Image: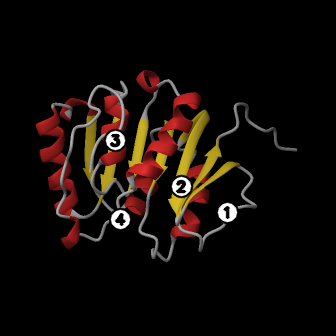
């Protein structure tokens, strides 16, 4: 695996993926997503949350592009240990807060808001369809904030009120959701 853009472009990291329950985003899909994000975000100004962080690839890309406030969450201890070692080897440990915890417990206990949230859950996760609603119910995004969900074709979300875009890259699908800029008044 490699970092595809920014100051760390080309740096490689090699997780022992054959032994892990992870499914890292392909370089092709990751590059396409970051081409979209380049037009939507100021990387050096965003506060990022990476849920189901796995190998940490998403966070490394953000740091490489200037982001200094990333929270990585994953419950799988070998992934967490790998990310700690990799952030140290890349010299970026001060920019990534690493949390070893079940993502749903983290969401339930979280009180912070973020400008960008990425969730790349295991495709077979039985509760995958609840994630967008949980993010918005817990008000985890700042106004105008962006939430990206990676999933396979078995999940739709097309009727979700905050859905703003859909991008397909083979069997990898990114759904982009956005928090309204202004609160909607209740009658």
Q: Is residue 180 above or below residue 149?
A: above
Mark 3, secondary structure of its residue: helix
Mark 2, secondary structure of its residue: strand
Category of crowding for the residue at label 3, using alpha-carbon neighbours closer than 10 angstroms: few (below 14), some (14–19), many (at least 20): many
Mark sitting earlier along the chain (1/2): 2
Q: Is residue 7 above or below residue 82?
A: above
Category of crowding for the residue at label 4, using alpha-carbon neighbours closer than 10 angstroms: few (below 14), some (14–19), many (at least 20): few
Q: Which mark is residue 149?
A: 2
- Quote the CA–CA distance across marks 4 and 1: 21 Å
Mark sitting earlier along the chain (4/1): 4
Residue 13 locus on image (x, y percent): 19, 48
Q: Which residue is at the far right?
A: 187
Q: Residue 59 carries which label?
A: 3
Q: Which mark is residue 91?
A: none
Q: Is residue 78 above or below residue 93?
A: below
- Quote the CA–CA distance across marks 1 and 2: 10 Å
Which numbered disc, 3 or 4, marks the residue closer to the eye? 4
**Are discs 1 and 2 less than 8 Å apart at CB?**
yes
Tag 4 residue: 23
Q: Is residue 110 visible?
A: no
Residue 44 locus on image (x, y percent): 41, 22
Residue 123 locus on image (x, y percent): 46, 71
Which residue is located at x 56 percent, y 37 percent? 36
Left or right relative to 181: residue 68: left
Tag 1 residue: 157
Mark sitting earlier along the chain (2/4): 4
Q: Can residue 88 be seen in this view?
A: yes
Mark sitting earlier along the chain (1/3): 3
Which residue is located at x 37 percent, y 45 percent? 58
């Amino acid at each position: 695996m490699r970092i595809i853009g920014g100051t760390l472009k080309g740096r490689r990291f090699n997780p022992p993926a054959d032994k892990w329950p992870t499914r890292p985003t392909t370089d092709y899909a990751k590059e396409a997503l970051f081409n979209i994000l380049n037009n939507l975000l100021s990387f050096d100004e965003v506060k990022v949350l990476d849920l189901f962080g796995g190998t940490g690839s998403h966070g490394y890309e953000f740091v490489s592009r200037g982001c200094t406030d990333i929270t990585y969450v994953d419950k799988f201890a070998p992934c967490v240990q790998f990310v700690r070692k990799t952030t140290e080897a890349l010299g970026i440990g001060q920019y990534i807060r690493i949390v070893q915890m079940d993502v749903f417990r983290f969401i339930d206990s979280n009180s912070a808001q973020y400008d960008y949230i990425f969730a790349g859950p295991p495709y077979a996760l039985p509760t995958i369809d609840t994630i967008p609603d949980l993010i918005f119910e817990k008000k985890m995004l700042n106004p105008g904030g962006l939430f990206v969900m990676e999933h396979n074709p078995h999940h739709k979300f097309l009727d979700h009120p905050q859905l703003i875009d859909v991008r397909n890259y083979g069997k990898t699908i990114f759904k982009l959701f956005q928090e309204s800029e202004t609160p909607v008044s209740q009658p």
